[in-house]
Amino acid sequence: MSLLAVLPEDLVRKFPTLEPSEARRLLAIVHRTGQMPSVTPAGVRRAPFFQIRDAIPLQSLELISRRPSKLDPFVKYAFGTSDGAIVEAVRIPLERPNRFVVCVSSQTGCAVGCAFCATGRLGTGRNLAAWEIVDQVRQVRDDLPEQGRVHGVVFQGMGEPLANVDAVIQSVRVMTDPSLQSIDGRAITVSTAGLIRPLPRLLESLPRVRLGVSIGHANPQRRLELMPIESANPLQKVLDIAADHARATRIATMLAYTLLGGVNDGESDADELSELLQHYVARADLPPRLSLIPYNPIGANDPFVASDPTRAERFRQRLRTLGIPVVRRYSGGSDVGAACGQLGMELGR
């Protein structure tokens, strides 16, 4: 446990003599400085302050490396955990000056095994604690330019977020608390390869957060070859749950489709994806946000190549006839292993 994963109301429940205003003030200092104050802060009484200081530690990740890309303004961070694992996060610049998104990890590896993702090659790791997720955001925020601010967070780093759903929910609650990280929930995206069982819990607990789903391929058998999760978690069922959530909240699901040259980027592949999207729209009464992601190399014995730009554009144009917003996402930081699918590439066990 760490104070970085505690909400003000959690602290008041644990220490009933503490006033809510004292809890907010103390935790705000912790999140701003990354440290427990050495003396009692103004507005906080001495007795509860010392109780909290002695009862709950303030743990933090160790910054192992900071690697700015030479190609673009992306920065990759490697953090060490107390048990010797390494997790990576990425600082992503937005078009608006001084606005950034933090791509965070939720596990030290990944058991899902998507064929186009480097983290899947690491195999099963452990779940990160909520404070370990929050601390990635805090430390990246502390490294921003003077006028910079964290506009949003995406759970698209190492691990399958829904396999660690409790810690993900708690970390988002901390991130969105106005006295802590104060990030708008609508600017947070939790992406999944499609674990069905914990999905309703995530959506019920965090109704304002955007859900992201990795597609791989619209055809179930073809998807199974790329994403083994399809066998027990059919994509169609995942998207039905997502569509119902979108219909109720009016928050469109973000669908991610990694273009693999000669594998899933042909006209027939686009047509199958079109059918899938039409089913989603009919159920959600709202178009999804579809991102076409370029494939990025993931190390030795790389099984795929990126889609040819002309072929990728033809794929996009074929989908645009549906009237669904389609963007070809820029995936930056590939020279330092920070691009989509590359996190964990240099951490082979």
Image (tube, rainbow, N blue to C red):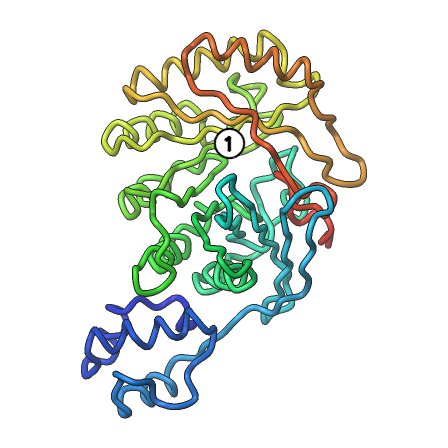
For image coordinates 57% across by 12% down, the residue present is 269
For image coordinates 52% across by 16% down, the residue present is 219
Instruction: Describe residue 157's horizontal placement relative to residue 185 as left or right.
Output: right
Q: Is residue 114 above or below residue 308?
A: below
User: Going by the picture, which residue comes out furthest to the right?
Assistant: 300
Q: Is residue 186 above or below residue 234?
A: below
Q: Nearer the viewer, residue 13 or 152?
A: 152
Q: On the image, numbered disc 1 is attached to which residue?
A: 214
User: Which quadrant of the figure has residue 296?
Assistant: top right
- Amino acid tagged 1: Ser
Q: Nearer the viewer, residue 296 or 56?
A: 296
Q: Give the percent coordinates (x, y) of residue 208.
A: 29, 42
For image coordinates 43% across by 72% down, the residue present is 2
Q: Give the percent coordinates (x, y) of residue 272.
A: 51, 11
Q: Give the percent coordinates (x, y) of residue 226.
A: 61, 28
Instruction: Describe residue 122's horizontal placement relative to residue 23 as left or right.
Output: right
For image coordinates 24% across by 80% down, the residue present is 15
Question: Which element is circle 1 on?
Answer: strand
Q: Nearer the viewer, residue 2 or 72?
A: 72
Count up the numbered dots.
1
Q: Give the percent coordinates (x, y) of residue 104.
A: 52, 51
| Label 1 packing within 10 angstroms: few (<14), some (14-19), many (20+) | some
In what quadrant of the picture does the N terminus appear? bottom left
Instruction: Describe residue 75's horizontal placement relative to residue 250 as left or right.
Output: right
User: Which quadrant of the figure has residue 323?
Assistant: top left
In what quadrant of the picture does the C terminus appear? bottom right
Q: Is residue 320 above or below residue 126?
A: above
